[in-house]
């Protein structure tokens, strides 16, 4: 599965992620040299956009190729759109929308 590029702000595109891998892979250029950020994954199709998963990501300075395991208990469903996002120390929000797809 290829790595997706995080976008600053909220972009219109939606990436397809194979649910069989159970992993969201993305790249992030850590210019502010943060050591960690807290992320959330919200369901954009469910009323109130509930948070379905959250956690911490450890970062290195420069380009990071990261992987987030999608929790089986979170109930990620095919054909639903989810938003992964975090805010860095510069108060910039980075995000990617994704839709789990069958293998």
Image: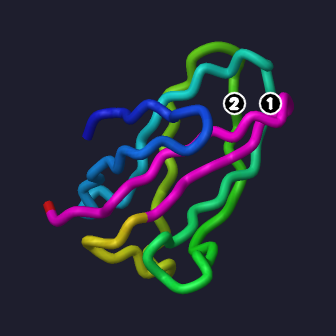
Q: Is residue 91 left or right of residue 13?
A: right
Percent position (x, y) of residue 77? 33, 77
Q: Main secondary structure of the magenta part?
A: strand
Q: Which residue is mark 1?
A: 35
At horizontal 50% and vertical 72% (from top left) the residue drawn is 43
| Residue 86 sits inside the magenta stretch | yes
At horizontal 36% and vertical 44% (from top left) the residue drawn is 13
Percent position (x, y) of residue 35? 80, 30
**Colouring mode (rainbow / by chain / secondary structure / one colour):** rainbow
Percent position (x, y) of residue 66? 52, 36
Q: Are marks 2 and 1 in contact (CB under 8 Å)?
A: yes
At horizontal 50% and vertical 78% (from top left) the residue drawn is 74
Question: Dividing the image into 4 quarters, which one contains the N terminus?
Answer: top left
Q: Foreground: 39 or 43?
A: 43
Q: CA distance from mark 2 to mark 1?
A: 5 Å
In the image, residue 74 above or below residue 82: below
| Residue 62 sits inside the magenta stretch | no
**Magenta extent:** 82-102
């Amino acid at each position: 599965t290829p790595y997706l590029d995080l976008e600053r702000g909220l972009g219109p595109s939606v990436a397809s992620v194979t649910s069989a891998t159970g992993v969201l892979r993305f790249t992030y250029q850590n210019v502010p040299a943060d050591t960690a950020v807290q992320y959330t994954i919200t369901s954009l199709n469910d009323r109130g956009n509930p948070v379905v998963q959250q956690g911490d990501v450890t970062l290195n300075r420069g380009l990071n190729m990261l992987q987030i395991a999608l929790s089986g208990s979170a109930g990620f469903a095919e054909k639903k759109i989810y938003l992964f996002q975090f805010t860095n120390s510069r108060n910039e929000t980075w995000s990617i929308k994704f839709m789990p797809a069958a293998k």
